């Protein structure tokens, strides 16, 4: 047998996700290693991680505790069937997680990604109502500009047009409430925007149109991330919760980016003091090291499924890799790091410094808004006429050349560094970004 050949200079075969493939393959940007706050590129440059990878490496990179947990687990028990069998770390992890979640969210269902966690939550909501004899509640309500991953469930309730328009009818029985982005009143807000709690009333409009008896659940991101960081106006989430309660509709918080310390509390539900009925997470659950996602459910939802003969499966749903042992070990190691280093609350301490730093970019060319919450920030740029996304994408390329990783959506630059970032690194990040913005046409 021939020895396998490694052809790293052949970039054609890999169809890259959410990437301008032709642009990338003409000018590749390769990371070959990472440590703590920095990546190293193939040409040996250090790049400051301004985005925690893709909002996921909350503990920073290549942390020994997590690496060792994975190595040990792979050698001890690499895989156990996820259906009708168990392994101790799945139960340890579930128990630890539900101690961290808001009170009442007592059960966790494991998935491998945020998209799967979202699908799981949508299916749980539908099946829950049916199990209680309210099968007429089949509608799912999302929000304009929402991002809930790329499964058919997620794109149906999601509200980003490019993620939806190519894919036919998607799920039926879905409607959307309006987004909350309002630069005319809230531009350059620090923290929660002052105006727009009344946008929650749009849910009453949708309910009046369809009737509450047909609606199973509303899904929203407490802080919308991938659409370009939309921070909820003061009082908005509380009103959404109250309307859902009034009409017997489940509220799902998609905490795939806000979970695990991003706002300075374990979850956004804690930050806002608003508890959903179902909550989805991924990314930070393993600090991005091994794919894993999860859905948390309130006790009464879990209990609604626990009926019928005991030998029967209660929920016909699950994945081959649900609670995969290596992923569980990675998550347990990650929780240890979060706990030992106080990372789930560290963003609260850094938030004022972070806010001052990123708002110092106000006044630079083309900047039409800056917003922040916890360790999230966004700089919105005026699009180039007739060439939307180009200005921010140019900023991304220039930042990379200058040793900074940022993320852009449309003409918005999103920032979400690992929660271990130092004040000096925040200064670095903002100085580099400022230098980039000054050079944009
Ligand atoms: C709020 C939200 N939900 C779901 C997802 C999808 O997660 P994944 O890419 O792991 O499927 C993301 C990913 O960015 C997200 O931000």
Image (cartoon, helix red, strand yellow):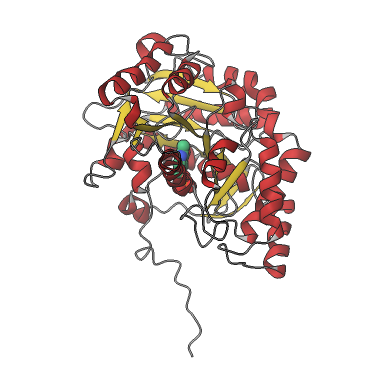
Residue reaching furthest to the right:
340
* Vertical side of 305 occupied by 101: above or below: above
Residue reaching furthest to the front:
309
Total labels: the figure holds 0
Residue 403 visible? The answer is no
Q: Residue at x 50, y 43 (%)?
A: 54
- Is 117 positioned to the left or the right of 97 in the image? left
- Is 83 positioned to the left or the right of 9 in the image? right
Question: Where the C terminus falls, by quadrant?
Answer: top left
Pinpoint residue 23: horizontal percent, then vertical percent. 33, 50
Q: Residue at x 59, y 25 (%)?
A: 374
* Vertical side of 32 occupied by 133: above or below: above
Pinpoint residue 347: horizontal percent, then vertical percent. 65, 28
Pinpoint residue 405: horizontal percent, then vertical percent. 51, 40
Pinpoint residue 371: horizontal percent, then vertical percent. 48, 20
Residue reaching furthest to the bottom:
1
Residue 351 visible? The answer is yes
Foreground residue among 289 and 325: 325
Q: Residue at x 62, y 40 (%)?
A: 58
* Quadrant in which residue 144 is drawn: top left
Foreground residue among 53 and 243: 243
Foreground residue among 213 and 282: 213
* Quadrant in which residue 183 is drawn: top left
Q: Residue at x 42, y 28 (%)?
A: 249
- Is 439 positioned to the left or the right of 263 in the image? left
Foreground residue among 106 and 363: 106
């Amino acid at each position: 047998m021939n020895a396998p050949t490694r052809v790293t200079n052949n970039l054609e075969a890999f169809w890259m996700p959410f990437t301008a493939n032709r642009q990338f393959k003409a000018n590749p940007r390769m990371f070959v290693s990472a440590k703590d706050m920095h990546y190293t590129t193939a040409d040996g440059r250090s790049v400051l991680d301004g985005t925690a990878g893709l909002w996921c490496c909350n503990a920073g990179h290549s942390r020994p505790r997590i690496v060792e947990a994975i190595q040990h687990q792979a050698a001890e028990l690499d895989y156990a069937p996820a259906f009708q069998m168990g392994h101790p770390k799945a139960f340890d992890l579930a128990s630890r997680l539900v101690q961290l979640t808001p009170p009442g969210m007592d059960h966790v269902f494991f998935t491998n990604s945020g998209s799967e966690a979202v699908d799981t939550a949508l299916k749980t909501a539908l099946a829950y109502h049916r199990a209680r004899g309210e099968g007429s509640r089949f509608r799912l309500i999302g929000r304009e500009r929402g991002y809930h991953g790329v499964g058919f469930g997620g794109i149906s309730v999601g509200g980003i047009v490019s993620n939806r328009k190519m894919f036919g009818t998607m799920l039926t029985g879905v409607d959307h409430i309006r987004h909350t982005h309002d630069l005319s009143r809230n531009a350059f807000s620090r923290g929660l925007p002052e105006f727009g709690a009344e946008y929650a009333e749009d849910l009453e409009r949708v309910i009046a149109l369809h009737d509450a008896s047909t609606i199973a659940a509303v899904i929203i991101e407490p802080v919308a991330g991938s659409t370009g960081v939309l921070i909820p106006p003061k009082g908005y989430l509380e009103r959404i919760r109250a309307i859902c309660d009034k009409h017997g509709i489940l509220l799902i918080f998609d905490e795939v980016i806000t979970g695990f310390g991003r706002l300075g509390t374990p979850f956004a539900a804690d930050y806002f003091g608003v508890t959903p009925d179902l909550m989805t997470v991924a990314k930070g659950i393993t600090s991005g090291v091994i794919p894993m996602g999860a859905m948390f459910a309130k006790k009464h939802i879990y209990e609604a499924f626990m009926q019928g003969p005991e030998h029967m499966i209660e929920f016909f749903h699950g994945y081959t890799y649900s609670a995969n042992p290596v992923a569980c070990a990675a998550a347990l190691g990650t929780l240890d790091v979060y706990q030992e280093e106080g990372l789930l609350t560290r963003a609260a301490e850094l938030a004022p410094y972070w806010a001052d730093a990123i708002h110092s970019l106000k006044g630079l060319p083309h900047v039409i808004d800056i917003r922040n919450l916890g360790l999230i920030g966004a700089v919105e740029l005026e699009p180039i006429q007739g060439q939307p996304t180009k200005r921010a994408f140019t900023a991304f390329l220039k930042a990379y050349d200058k040793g900074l990783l940022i993320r852009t959506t449309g003409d918005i630059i999103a920032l979400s560094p690992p929660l271990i970032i130092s004040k000096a690194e925040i200064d670095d990040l903002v100085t580099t970004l400022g230098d980039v913005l000054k050079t944009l046409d």
